[in-house]
Each structure stands twice: as structure tokens, then as C-alpha cells.
Amino acid sequence: MSAAASIRTSDGRTLQVADAGGAGFPLLWQAGSPHTGDLIGPVRAAAEAAGLRLIGWARPGYGASTRWPDRRIADAAADAAVVADALGIDRFALAGYSGGGPHALAAAALLPDRVAAVGTFASVAPDTGGDDWLAGMASPEALTAARQGRAAREALPDDFDPESFVAADWAALGGPLAAIGEDAVRAGSQGTDGLVDDDVAFAQPWGVDLARVTAPVLLVQGDADRVIPPAHARLLGAAIPHAEVRIRPGDGHVSVLAALSEVFAALAAAR
């Protein structure tokens, strides 16, 4: 398969897939919300340094991937399997950032025989149904609306609150992680379908038991994150008994990606 391609799922959808190629152990990557489905420079560089073959796909509703409004977090497992099968891959590692984290974890839970290890950065945790799930978010309006259903979330304007990022985030976006912000802006210009569907899926039952994850799990989180607060990493750590939670002092939602090389090296070693 070429570096960028579209594949068909059994239910007739299209998935936009990007493959960095190479002979390294495969790493299936799920980007944050929103994203274009492109393989971003800093992520690609960290994968190459760890000897991993980076592969990503645009979740339904992003890029050229067909929208799937009623998708659940658990449905990411089937798409991960489709991508791996199309590329002739049996076993792989998984990683996800922010909104991509739940999808990577779900795939790990539902594909235990194929997943060697999984890592997340600032991942969303399952909704507890209480105020604790939203506590510490600078702008919880989107997920609050998503709890009420699709119509409520679609009616909410997608206005970014600059207070969601701390100083370390702005420094990262002005330097080594600039491509992350640029990709999110490009994705936003393409529409909000994928973002809305992600938010609704986060706030509804995920359809997966995270305790079924058997592969090694590394959950990385910034203690200053105001988008997905550190309580989410602790919730995930409690749901996945053998998971390792690493809290990075001073990091926010973007600057936590300074740990890309560290996490990818751990995933490569765990294969």
C-alpha cells in the first residue's frame, strides 16, 4: 500500500490511512480531536527514532474517512483491525493522543492477541456521570453538551478558549510541536463532524471493558492540563489494573507530547 491510501471497511465505509513505511515494528497511531489524519512531523520523527513504523488513520468524520455518526469508542477496534489487515500486519503497538487515547485503549482491550503494548498522552477517561469528569477543564461546555446527545453538541459553537492552554503549551506550539496546532486548525477548517462524533462518543458508554486490556499500558499526563485534567489519567489507571501512570510536572495538554520519544521507546521495547 502507498504512503497515503483509502481502504474499504466491510460495512462500505472508507478509511483514510497514512503509512510512514519502513521495516520497524508497526505502531498504529490515533491523533487528537480534531485531526486531519496526516502523520505529523514530531510524531513521525519520534517513531523513526524508536525504530517503529508509524501508521495512522483518520477516524470516521475526519479527512477523507466516511462519517459514522453513531460510532462508539469500542468501534475503533474493528477499524484498527481493518487497517492492520490491509497492510498485512498481525501484531502492533497502539498509541493515542487526547481524543485518540480512548480509541487506542479500546482497540487494545478488544484485540488482545494482536496488541503488543499501548501508550496514551492526555487521554480522555470514560464518563463517570458526575462532576468529577468535568472538574478542572477550562472549557467543559462541549462535553457537557455531548452528555445531552448529538443535537445539543451540534448546536454548540466550536470556539476555542485560549485559557485551555498553559504557558508550556503555547511555548510548545510556538516551537517543536507547532505542527500539532497547525493540523488541528486544518482539521477545523474541514468541518466539525468528526469532532462532534468524538465528543458524543466520549460522553456515552464506550462499549468496552478496559480491564480486558492485557498488553502493557503507559498513560502519560501533564499535571497542568486544563483540557483533559490529570484526574482522567488516574481514572484510566484505576480501570486498567496493570497500567503505569506517569504524571509530568508543569506540562499541559500540548506540551505533554514532549514525552513522545520516551513513550515510543517504551512501546518498541515492549513488543
Image (spheres, rainbow, N blue to C red):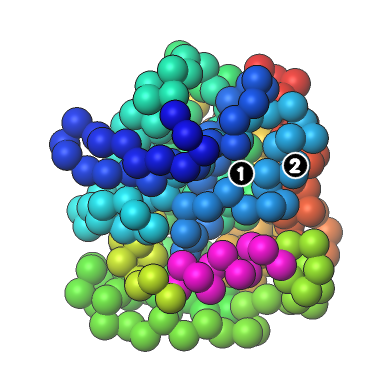
- Residue 271 within the magenta-colored segment of the rendering: no
Q: What residue type is labelled 2?
A: Ala
Q: Residue 46 carries which label?
A: 2
Crowd tier of the residue under label 1, counting other residues whose Cα lies within 10 Å: few below 14, some 14–19, many 20 or above: many
Label 2: which secondary element: helix
Whole-percent x, y for residue 141 in the image: 42, 79
Residue picked out by circle 1: 120
Residue 252 shown left or right of residue 192 in the figure: right
Toward which corner of the image does residue 191 lie, by quadrant?
A: bottom left
Toward which corner of the image does residue 264 lie, by quadrant?
A: top right
245 or 182, nearer to the observer: 182
Name the chief secondary structure element in magenta.
helix
Residue 214 shown left or right of residue 163 in the figure: left
Question: Which residue is depicted at the point 64% across and 63% down?
Answer: 180
Toward which corner of the image does residue 237 lie, by quadrant?
A: top right
Residue 11 shown left or right of residue 135 in the figure: left
Q: What stretch is highlighted in magenta?
A: 178-188
